[in-house]
Image (cartoon, helix red, strand yellow):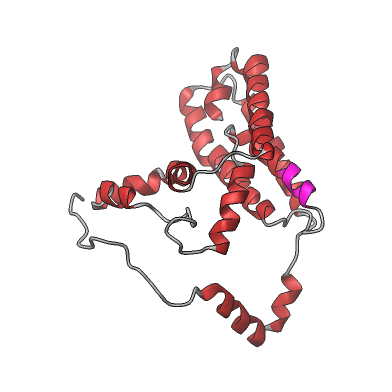
Amino acid sequence: MGAKVSRSDFEWSYTEEPHASRRKEILKKYPEIKKLFGHDPKFKYIVLCMVMVQLVTMYFLRNVSWSVLLVVAYCFGGVINHSLMLSIHEMAHNLAFGYSRPTANRVLSLIANLPIGIPFAITFKYYHLEHHRYQGDEKLDTDIPTYVEAKLFSTTFGKFIWVCLQPFFYALRPMFVYPKNPTSLELFNTVFQLSFDVFIYYFLGKFHHNILCYR
C-alpha cells in the first residue's frame, strides 16, 4: 500500500489528438449514428425531477438519526447529486434545449446546481469547453492532474486517497493552473446559489441541522 510508483514523469504523447479523426472514421462506417445527435426533449424534466427529489428528501430527513442520515446521504443523495453534476455537463454542451437556446440551457444549469450547494455550473462550462478544445494541453486542459498531485499521491494508498478526493481536486485545480477573472454570469451563479443556501438555512437548516448535513 505504501509502495511508490516507478514512473517519475507523466507519459507524454505527441501524436494527433484522436477524437476528430475517430469521429470521422466512425461516422463514415456508421452514418446512422447521426440520427442520435441533438438534445433529448425529456432531459429537462428529468433534471427538474431530480432537483425536487433532493429538496423533498432533505425535508423528510430533518428528524432522522445520524446513522440513517449518513446512509441515505451517501447512497441516495450522493447519487442524485452526481447525476445533477453530469446533467450540468450535458447543459454545458447545450443538450437540454439544443444549441439554438443557450440561455435556457444556462438557466436550467443554475437550477440543477441548487441542491449541490456550491456554485460551479457556469465556471464548469467555461473550463470544460476548453478541455475539449485543447485536450491534452498541460495548462489549458485543467482536467489533467498537476505535478504536485502526482508527487503528493505517488503511493498506492495515496492514489486511493486522490481518487476519493477527486471532486475537490477537479474543482480547485483550474484556480491554480489556469485562473481567470470571473464573468458576470459566474457572479450571478454565485449570488443565486448562495441566496438559495441562505434561504435553506434560515427557513429550515437552523432548526434542523440534518438538512444542512444532507446537502
Whether 166 is drawn above or below 55: the answer is: below
Magenta-highlighted stretch: main secondary structure?
helix
Res. 54 image quadrant: top right
Using the image as rendered, state which of residue 202 and residue 152 is in the foreground. 152
Q: Identify which residue is drawn at 65% across, 30% down.
A: 193
- Residue 189: x %, y % from top left: 66, 35
Residue 76 part of the magenta segment: no
Res. 168 image quadrant: top left
- Residue 24: x %, y % from top left: 62, 81
Extreme-front residue of the structure = 181
- Residue 192: x %, y % from top left: 69, 30
Answer with left or right where residue 61 lies relative to residue 56.
Answer: left
Q: Identify which residue is drawn at 68% across, 37% down.
A: 184
Answer with left or right where residue 177 lies relative to residue 49.
Answer: left
Using the image as rendered, state which of residue 209 and residue 148 is in the foreground. 148
What is the span of residues highlighted in magenta in the rendered image?
Answer: 102-108
Q: Identify which residue is drawn at 65% across, 34% down.
A: 187
- Residue 19: x %, y % from top left: 55, 73
Using the image as rendered, state which of residue 20 and residue 59 is in the foreground. 20
- Count of numbered labels shown in the rendering: 0
Answer with left or right where residue 200 lies relative to residue 130.
Answer: right
Whether 167 is drawn above or below 134: the answer is: above
Extreme-left residue of the structure = 3
Q: Identify which residue is drawn at 81% across, 53% down.
A: 101
Residue 105 part of the magenta segment: yes
